[in-house]
Image: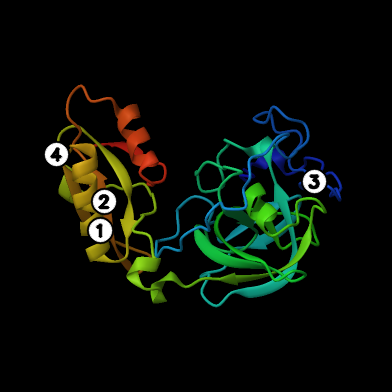
C-alpha cells in the first residue's frame, strides 16, 4: 500500500529496476522489507481469474480531489467512465503483501488489482500488453506509481499474466470498465464499504457490520438475503444519498450478544465481501 502520509513525502524514491517491482517508500516503518521483491517459489498464477467489474460507489478513502507526493500535485478524476490511456506498467510485490491499500483494502499479490494515480477507487480496468496482446481485468484500489514514466502499478499476478514480471515493466493500454452496462451475470453482487451513520438505526441496540453499498436496490436485497443465511444474523438495507447518487447500504446486525465478531468477519471475507466494518449503533 502506498497511502499518502505526509511524513513520507520527502522519502527517497529509488530508481526503477529492470528485473523486479518498482521500489516504494523505503523509509516507511510499516514494511519489514527494505526492497520489494517477487515470491521465491511462486505458485502458478496463470489461472488467477480476472477481477469482476462491479457497479459500486467510490470509497471515502483514497479519493481526495488532489494530493501531493514528493512535491508534485496529482488530481483524481471525477469518474472512471471513458478513461483510456497508453503508457508503461510496473508492478509491486511481497513488500506490500498483506498491507492496506489507499482505500483500506488488503493488498494481495495473488489477486488482480492495481494502483493508479488518478482513477477513482475502487474502479475496474482492462489492461492490455501492447507487445503480446494479452489482457487482464484489475480492480484499481491503490495510488501510484509515482515514477514519471509509469502509468499503472500492477499486482504480481496481473503482471505475471501479462508477462512483464521478468522485464519489470511493459507497454500497456488501460481502459476503464463501465460496469453499469454489464449484464447481471457479468457483474458481481459485491458491495463497497464506507462509514455510515443512519438515522433509522439510532434506536437499534448493539453493533453492526457494515458490509457495503449498492447503487441497485435489487442487488442490495439479494445480498441481504444471502447474508442473512450466511451470518445467521439480522441484515438491514438502509437507503442513503451520497454524492448525488442513491445508495443502498447493507448492514449485518444488530449483532447477537456473545457472537465472535472476528469469526463472522472471516466468514464474510471468505464469501467474497471485502473488509466489513464494525460500527456502533448511532
Q: Residue furthest left?
A: 203
Inter-mark Cα distance, 3 to 1: 41 Å
Residue located 22% across and 57% down the image: 222
Q: Which label number is shown at residue 20?
A: 3
| Front tag of 3 and 1 | 3
- Which residue in the protein does label 1 denote? 220
Q: Residues within 10 Å of mark 3 (few under 14, many from 20)?
A: many
The quarter of the picture where the C terminus appears is: top left
| Front tag of 2 and 4 | 2
- Report the front residue among 171 and 257: 171
- Which residue in the protein does label 4 denote? 204
Looking at the image, residue 41 sits to the left or right of residue 103; the answer is right
| Above-or-below relation of 119 to 276 | below
Q: Residue furthest top?
A: 258
Mark with earlier residue (3, 1): 3
Mark with earlier residue (1, 2): 1
Residue located 72% across and 63% down the image: 151
| Front tag of 4 and 1 | 1
Residue located 77% across and 42% down the image: 10
| Front tag of 3 and 4 | 3
- Report the front residue among 256 and 137: 137
Residue located 57% across and 68% down the image: 77
Inter-mark Cα distance, 3 to 2: 41 Å
- Which residue in the protein does label 2 denote? 250
| Above-or-below relation of 215 to 262 | below
Mark with earlier residue (3, 4): 3
Instruction: Say which quarter of the image contains residue 162.
Output: bottom right
Amino acid at each position: 500500500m502506498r497511502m499518502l502520509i505526509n511524513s513520507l513525502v520527502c522519502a527517497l524514491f529509488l530508481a526503477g529496476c529492470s528485473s523486479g517491482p518498482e521500489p516504494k517508500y523505503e523509509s516507511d516503518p510499516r514494511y519489514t522489507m527494505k526492497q520489494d521483491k517477487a515470491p521465491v517459489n511462486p505458485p502458478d498464477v496463470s489461472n488467477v481469474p480476472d477481477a469482476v467489474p462491479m457497479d459500486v460507489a467510490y470509497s471515502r478513502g483514497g479519493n481526495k480531489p488532489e494530493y501531493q507526493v514528493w512535491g508534485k500535485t496529482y488530481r483524481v478524476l471525477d469518474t472512471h467512465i471513458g478513461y483510456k490511456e497508453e503508457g508503461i506498467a510496473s508492478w509491486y510485490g511481497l513488500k506490500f503483501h498483506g498491507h492496506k491499500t489507499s482505500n483500506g483494502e488488503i493488498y494481495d499479490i495473488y489477486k488482480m488489482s492495481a494502483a493508479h494515480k488518478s482513477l477513482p477507487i475502487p474502479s475496474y480496468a482492462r489492461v492490455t500488453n501492447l507487445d503480446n496482446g494479452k489482457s487482464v481485468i484489475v480492480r484499481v484500489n491503490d495510488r501510484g506509481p509515482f515514477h514519471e514514466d509509469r502509468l499503472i502499478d500492477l499486482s504480481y499476478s496481473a503482471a505475471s499474466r501479462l508477462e512483464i514480471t521478468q522485464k519489470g515493466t511493459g507497454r500497456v493500454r488501460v481502459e476503464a470498465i463501465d460496469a453499469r452496462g454489464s449484464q447481471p451475470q457479468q457483474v458481481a453482487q459485491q458491495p463497497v464499504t464506507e462509514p455510515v451513520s443512519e438515522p433509522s438505526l439510532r434506536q437499534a441496540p448493539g453493533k453492526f457490520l457494515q458490509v457495503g453499498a449498492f447503487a441497485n436496490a435489487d442487488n442490495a436485497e439479494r445480498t441481504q438475503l444471502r447474508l442473512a443465511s450466511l451470518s445467521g444474523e439480522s441484515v438491514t438495507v438502509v437507503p442513503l444519498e451520497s454524492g448525488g447518487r442513491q445508495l443502498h447500504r447493507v448492514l449485518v446486525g444488530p449483532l447477537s450478544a456473545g457472537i465472535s465478531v472476528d469469526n463472522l468477519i472471516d466468514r464474510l471475507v471468505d464469501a467474497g465481501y471485502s473488509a466489513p466494518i464494525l460500527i456502533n449503533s448511532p
